[in-house]
Image (cartoon, helix red, strand yellow):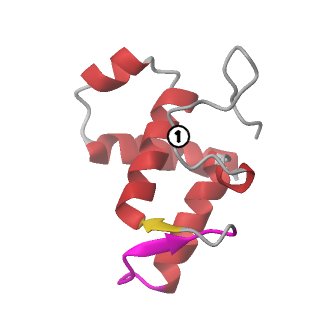
Amino acid sequence: MQITQNGNGKVPEYVSRRYQDQLNLVENIKQLDEALAFDKTQWGISFADSTITSREYFNNRLLTQYCLDIKKMTFEEFLSDTASEQTIKTQMRKWYKTQK
């Protein structure tokens, strides 16, 4: 899977964790799944660059990345969308299964 870039060739700026190994949505979902499988009680998730973030933040970041990069929603569409978090999560998981 290629990383979606904006018109000037840069990585989208809405994603705050923009290290090269954190840009691929498929790999990010896989990393979250592995962390959950390892220990469901941990609050955080660790990255290769030695940083940590909460799993809740990381999950929400993945949902945002899915909506903007994969569903190609504009920022306005994203903000006004009335779909529930669970609906978007279900859509993202269905998409993820097709990427394996």
Residue type highlighted by circle 1: Val
In the rendered image, which quarter contains the N terminus?
Answer: top right
- Position of 69 compared to 63: left or right? right
The residue under the point 68% across, 67% down is 49
Q: Is residue 42 magenta?
A: yes
Vertical side of 41 occupied by 24: above or below: above
**Numbered circles on residues, count:** 1
From what the image shows, is residue 54 above or below residue 75? Answer: below
Left or right? Give the position of 52 relative to 55: right
Classify mark 1: helix, strand or loop.
loop
**Position above or below: 25 against 33:** above
- Please report the bounds of the magenta region as a residue range: 39-48
Camera-nearest residue between 44 and 68: 44
Q: Is residue 3 left or right of residue 91?
A: right
Examine the structure image and report whether residue 41 is included in the region drawn in magenta: yes
Residue 78's spot in the image, x, y percent?
Answer: 36, 25
- Across and down, in percent, residue 57 comes to 38, 56
Q: Residue at x 45, y 17 (%)?
A: 74
Camera-nearest residue between 15 and 65: 15
Q: Which residue position holds label 1?
A: 15
Q: Quadrant of residue 56?
A: bottom left
Helix, strand or loop for the magenta stretch, by majority: loop
Whole-percent x, y for residue 85 in the image: 28, 44
* Crowd tier of the residue under label 1, counting other residues whose Cα lies within 10 Å: few below 14, some 14–19, many 20 or above: some
Q: Residue at x 43, y 73 (%)?
A: 44
| Residue at image coords 56%, 57% | 29
Image position, residue 81 (x, y; %): 28, 24
